[in-house]
Image: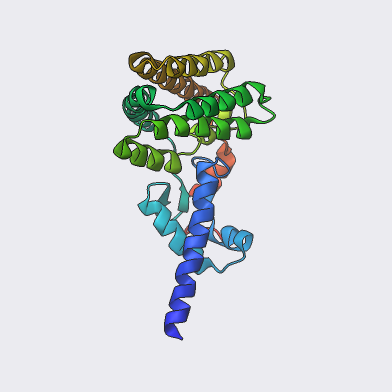
Amino acid sequence: MANDLGLQSLQLRQMVAARLRAEILEGILMPGEWLRQGTLARRHGVSQTPVREALKQLAAEGLVEDVPYRGARVVALRREDVEDLYSCRAVIESRAARFAAANITDDEIEEIEELYRRMVRCPVPESLGEYRELNGQFHAVIIAASRRSFLVRNLAQLWSAFPSMLWSRVPPVADASAPGRDEPDTAEHAEIVAALRKRDPERAARAVRHHIEAACISLLAAMENQGSTGPRWTNAEASADENQIGPAP
């Protein structure tokens, strides 16, 4: 009986953690947003115990921070986080693209071209979520075509941890395109497709690296714009939180 209760408690914690993790990574819960145990418990139909344990787990993963006497909140995204993530991508994905150009099949090229055509037809910002999903699939096919198991495995983990590559966590571009980014993004994807069709390893690696570095610059610019317009929560809310002793229900 005790083992059954323990298993049930573990399952509830994992369920709540999975839901909150998804909401953070998808930008539903934004950087700096307070995570009140009572509110979350009611939303997910559980007691506060699995919520408290889930928040501890997410804190260990670096998605949540515990502020003494105030509670837990979503970790704010820092400039260096974006720089580090995109620097890693630029190196690893460009290497994968180099091998993909040498190993890719005709069927995989056709799949990539179809994904590209669907991305071009996708109306933005109305279907931005669909566009980002197609973009993830586009990159996944290229990575798989590299036939390099280490690269495939590690990039799969990276994309699994950051499905929107942090775009959904920056309010100005969470549900809208970065200003002036749509046309260059389309051109960059087209160049990647052309390099793969030509089976040119150096051109493919160069195209992917340029695409990732350009995306990083746009995302950093959006973060700077967010800083100039201020965070989502108001000064009044921040002051109220500072005056609280202990987490609010």
Seen in the picture, residue 241 relative to 189 is either above or below; the reply is below
Seen in the picture, residue 80 relative to 11 is either above or below; the reply is above
Quadrant housing residue 6: bottom left
Looking at the image, the residue that sits furthest to the bottom is 1
Residue 131 shows in the view: yes
Return the x and y of residue 57 as percentages of the image width and height. Answer: 40, 57
Position of 228 compared to 77: left or right? right
Looking at the image, the residue that sits furthest to the front is 106
Q: Tell me, what colour scheme is on the image?
A: rainbow
Return the x and y of residue 109 as percentages of the image width and height. Answer: 49, 25
Name the residue rendered at 34%, 18% in the picture. Answer: 201
Name the quarter where the C terminus is drawn.
bottom right
Name the residue rendered at 46%, 53% in the picture. Answer: 72
Q: Return the residue nearer the eye: 227 or 209.
A: 209
Q: Return the residue nearer the eye: 197 or 117.
A: 197
Residue 67 shows in the view: no
Position of 111 compared to 143: left or right? right
Seen in the picture, residue 238 relative to 17 is either above or below; the reply is above
Return the x and y of residue 142 as percentages of the image width and height. Answer: 43, 29
Position of 168 compared to 87: left or right? right
Q: Number of numbered discs present? A: 0
Return the x and y of residue 241 as percentages of the image width and height. Answer: 52, 49
